[in-house]
Image (spheres, rainbow, N blue to C red):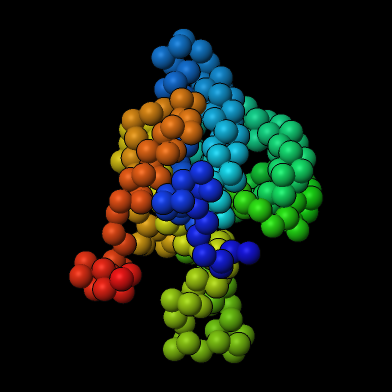
Amino acid sequence: MLHKPSQSDPSDPNEVIPRHVAIIMDGNGRWAKKRNMPRIAGHRAGVEAARKIVQACGKKGVEVLTLFAFSSENWRRPATEVSLLMELFLTALRRESKKLDKNNARLMVIGDRAAFAPKLQQEIARAEALTGDNTGLTIAIAANYGGRWDIVQAAQKLVRKIQSGELAAEQVTEQSIDAELAMYGFPEPDLFIRSGGEQRISNFLLWQLAYTELYFTDILWPDFDVAVLDNAFSSYANRQRRYGRTGDQVQVKGA
């Protein structure tokens, strides 16, 4: 399922659709502050925006959509906000997993789950099991995730293999590291999107974003809609991905 050619929107045969889209959903708190609302109201509005983008990506033929929901650094936020975010995550899992299953979408969570409450860990496992055999859009939720954590945990696995004699140090390659990362088996992101005006990747998919096209928008995440997604896709479609080659080489190869 994850290695077929990219599909395009059937309504526009010339549209180039990225196979894997990764998004940092930034700006929920600022959206709420502008409206004199509590920050959690912005996060709730952000869940609604995410639902619309999931639906749009499914319709357009995107294969994988990775959403950065909660970073390993977000534990530094006020305890009350973190607690409310965990409750929102639990509620969203319960509410959305059945809808995703009905629409043949697969849900998975990447990140270190050990810090989550047992009830949340159980709900994650239940949602993944419910949707695990589906063959449509895969939604990967990055929760308690960090790109550095991902690389470190992969390195630790490789060290254990070397210590046990299963692997020699000389056999450590990009491919063997990749095989231990949280998103092994998935295509690397073609398009990275960050809402909210910040222009950085904030420890998100550091290994996987090596050749990803980046798109930044000032739109705060709760206001991010299909029109903004279309703008990002249009920008992506007009870029030349060279992977170290020259532009002329790419044109000859695609001719």
| Residue 186 screen position, x and y as percent | 55, 63
User: Is residue 224 shown left or right of residue 245?
Assistant: right
Relative to 10, residue 49 above or below: above
Write down the quadrant of residue 40 in the picture: top right
Left or right relative to 239: residue 99: right
Q: Nearer the viewer, residue 47 or 152?
A: 47
Q: How many marks?
A: 0
Quadrant location of the N terminus in the rendered image:
bottom right
Q: Is residue 66 above or below residue 206?
A: above
* Percent x, y of residue 131: 75, 51
In which quadrant of the rendered image does the C terminus lie? Answer: bottom left
Looking at the image, is 115 positioned above or below residue 253?
above
Instruction: Residue at 52% x, 65% y: name it.
Output: 5
Residue 149 in view: no
Q: Residue at x 48, y 18 (%)?
A: 32
| Residue 69 appears in the figure | yes
Along the line of sight, which residue is nearer the eye, 76 or 208?
208
Residue 22 locus on image (x, y percent):
47, 49
Q: Identify the residue at horizontal 43%, vertical 76% (top origin).
A: 174
Residue 53 in the image: state x and y as whole percent: 54, 37
Residue sitting at 72 percent across and 44 percent down? 103
Locate residue 247 relative to residue 135 in the image: left or right: left
